[in-house]
Amino acid sequence: IYDKSGLMCQLDFSATPKNQSGILFSHIITEYTLGQAIADGIVKRPKIAEIENIPELESDNAAEKYRVQIDAAVDKWRTIYKELKKTGKKPILFVMAENTRAADQVADYLDSFKELSDRVLTIHTNKNDEVRTTELDQARKWAREIDEADNPFRAIVSVLMLVEGWDVRNVKVVVPLRPLTAKSKILPEQTLGRGLRRMFPGQLF
């Protein structure tokens, strides 16, 4: 906001106005909570699924270790895919892996499903969970275009690249295989936020 003398103030907007410890910024003017946004129909109404009695599988392969969770997610995605097929919209399955090795393993397993074969996009990060500079432009392009009808991808597997700043509407199933007890206390909210943008104006899904 400017006046004749120059800059008067700068306004920043964030879905997670907190630091990495989960503490609200001290300079907040007003807070519009996620719960209120859901109640007002601004975003989708999320359904958080919990799987009981999951067997503890010790394996170096993330696809084997989290087989129950992944299979449940694919089954849910299939149901939604069938429901939305007549609308011309494709739902996106988003998996947040623990590291790049696990991302490769999960992507390989997803590729074994007929509906997802050659339709799984893996976005790699470096050791600091940042997209490699050489891949950043392409990763952003893939991410921006994932909603497009002619985009072939139906699933995305990544580590942290898509935690924030990803304006995609078609994510319908989110699978957090990365522990939500990580140092970042806002990670659960950011992860949930990947699937909250609405696919259809005026409808809560």
Image (cartoon, rainbow, N blue to C red):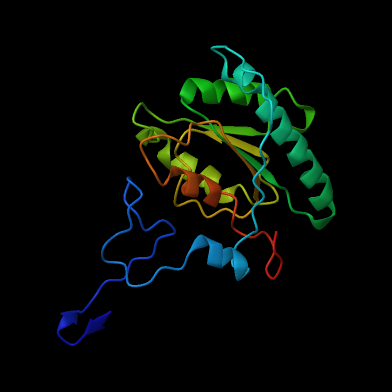
Q: Is residue 156 left or right of residue 27?
A: right
Which residue lies most toward the left here? 5
Query: Is residue 4 depicted above or below 46 in this figure?
Result: below
Q: Quadrant of the C terminus?
A: bottom right
Q: Residue 18 placed where, x, y %? A: 35, 54
- Residue at the spot x=46%, y=25% of the render? 99
Residue 154 picture quarter: top right
Query: Is residue 144 depicted above or below 139 in this figure?
Result: below
- Residue at the spot x=41%, y=56% of the render? 16
Which residue lies most toward the bottom here? 4
Q: Residue 49 placed where, x, y %? A: 67, 41
Q: Quadrant of the N terminus?
A: bottom left
Q: Nearer the viewer, residue 4 or 32?
A: 32
Q: Residue 72 placed where, x, y %? A: 72, 32
Query: Is residue 90 depicted above or below 3 in this figure?
Result: above
Q: Nearer the viewer, residue 123 or 135?
A: 123
Res. 102 visible in picture: yes
Residue 31 picture quarter: bottom left
Res. 153 visible in picture: no
Which residue lies most toward the top here? 59
Q: Residue 46 placed where, x, y %? A: 64, 53
